[in-house]
Amino acid sequence: MDTEDSSVTCSVVLEWLNELGSTVRKINHRTATLRLVRNIEREIFVEVRPEKNNQIIKLAIKGISVFNKFMAQGKASIKFQQNKCTLFLSNAPSAKLIGFLKTIFIKMTGHVPQSKGNCKNKFALKSLEGIQEISPATSTEVNRAKEKALAVSRATVTTPSPSSVRKRKFLEENGVKIPTAKKLYENPLVGEMTEEQKEVLKAVQCGRNVFFTGSAGTGKSYLLKKIISILPPDVTVATASTGVAACHIGGITLHQFAGIGLGSAVLERCYQLASRPSIASIWRRTKHLVIDEISMVDGEFFDKIEAVARHIRRNDKPFGGIQLILCGDFFQLPPIAKVNDQINYCFKSESWKKCVHFNYELKIVHRQSDPEFVKILNSIRIGRVTEDITNKLKATANQKIERNGILATRLCSHIKEADEINNFQLDELKGEVKEYNAHDSDESMMKTLDQQITVPSRLILKIGAQVMLLKNININKGLVNGARGVVTKFVDGMPSVLFRSGTNYLVKAEKWSVKLSTNAIVYRKQLPLKLAWAFSIHKSQGLTLDCVEMCLSRVFDAGQSYVALSRAQSLDSLRVIDFNEQQVWVNTDVLQFYKNFRRNRHEVEIIPLGKKLKIEKKNNYLTRS
């Protein structure tokens, strides 16, 4: 566990109530650090230490209740029953907040002995002498807390939210009431990071403008989510070049954020569009801007939003002083270009040279475990197709990759072709038709939801329908985003699906959320399924498919063949029909960019200074800090 899980820095409001429930005292700190400490009597306290004054407050963790529903948005509240005080936390890095609440949960339910004294002991509350910071939770404590959580029954409690009473699971031990929701003590972003991922994360924490790249399956999206989770939500905007990619990282499209439409207008008009109060306020409060799938951002558009940033923020620094975190692979799908127009990659823009100085490449592949297949994909990524590679890919044409009645998903170069195949195959099936309509929190946002999430607003199924799971349900059982299955029956109107892993799953509705530029969130509730006889290459970006076939004769973009092939888990789960080496090519500008990129990375020097590392700049490429 992170050694800093016993503290979190965020905005804090402390509110004390009297017996009648009226506010008698209220303190608001824009920035404060919360630490878990214990006194010599082993009692645990939350210490609130403001950034701008020495008014330290300690609250004993006894009889507390935690409201953690919005942890992913960096918000939570802790109600101290004995003190009649509630802590409202906001703008907290989500990973830090989850770690902090998890430590409270574990320390109070799996480790803390019975208190020996009064929680209002003057020494415990006021004296700094004898106060000791809580140590990180150990794996033994984590497992013990999980076991106790499984044994807890339901209880009804009033949460600290202003106007709602909700029924939730709570764990009560040693006077502590904490929701036992799985997410309280299991952070989905917790996992062993590689050294190369840690290097990027450290550069971001140091406030550097970074671009990190890597081949398909090297954990770029995982790292990006990790980065977003350590940044303050209120001043961080996560964006992506496409709606699906934006939804994947819990953000909005770059065009939504920028507020200048497609960016085709002259610069003065772009200034006017971005000066609208609702757009300008977002530009001004942003300190960290994340852009995923940067390979699909047009260079001219990038130049314009950089100029807009300086203009709106009245700051002449590159990008108006906003920290940039850029992620993507230029060997994959390029920006959309008009017919006969040259592709204008982002790295060719003037702004790229001014803004992006820290460059990293992730090289450890996690999606495919077969070294031979990884080697093939790395060669195809750079447009190199040997006779041996051609023969191995052609040999897959005769492979039988179907299992348990699950057919291979056909990857198509055009979205229309994929839709036609799915509709035709569904019509061919006999039997009862089941229709499932999504429930959207705002029906006027249906078009936006359709563009930004893969789950359809209207889903029609029959027994025998080939489907794809669109959400991670149970990783251990193979119920992951991209898993292939077939509908075997309907139970109480809901589809039962047999997946390729052999798991049967009675599918239930799940919820997706899309963040708008106004920070409002709209939801869609729908079955996490999509017809999967066919899928477009563009829509498959980011997916891992366990049973896939393709014919690449109609590919029209550089990198499109590589994106399609790299969706497969292995050569054994892949079928390529009529492969031809002419179907694989790479833009020469991209090859030159990566050639320069790698050469300059080798020229970087790391000079140790005591326990720290000094960052040396050379040819606009910098080392880790």
Image (tube, rainbow, N blue to C red):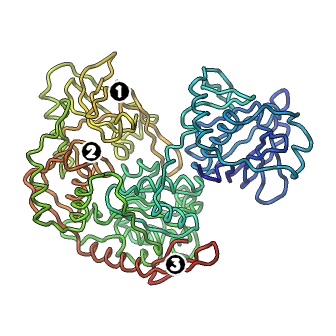
Q: CA distance from mark 2 to mark 1?
A: 19 Å
Residue 56 in sight: yes
Give the labeled residue for mark 3: 606
Residue 254: x percent and y percent?
Answer: 42, 58
Q: Quadrant of residue 30?
A: bottom right
Circle 1 Cα neighbour tier, 10 Å, few/some/many (<14 / 14–19 / ≥20): some
Identify the mark at residue 440; answer none if there is no mark: none
* Label 2 – label 3 distance at C-alpha: 40 Å
Specify the label residue 545 is tagged with: 2
For marks 2 and 1 on the same chain, the one whose residue lies earlier in the sequence: 1
Judge by depth and name the residue closer to the eye, 40 or 563.
Answer: 40
Which structural element holds mark 2? Answer: loop
Secondary structure category for the residue under label 1? loop
Position of residue 68 measured from the top left corner of the image (x, y, whole percent): 61, 37
Identified by mark 2, the residue type is Leu
| Mark 3 residue element | strand
Q: Position of residue 171 (x, y in %)?
A: 65, 27
C-beta proximity under 8 Å, tags 2 and 3: no
* Label 3 vs 1, first from the N-terminus: 1
Of mark 2 and mark 3, the one earlier in the sequence is: 2
Residue extending farthest right: 122
The image shows residue 176 at horizontal and vertical percentages of 72, 30
Q: Amino acid at mark 1?
A: Val
Residue at x 43% of width, y 78% of height:
353
Mark 3 vs mark 1: in front = 3
| Horizontal arrangement in the rendering, residue 346 relative to residue 186 (left or right) | left
- Badge 1 is on which residue? 507
> In screen coordinates, is 418 left or right of 201?
left
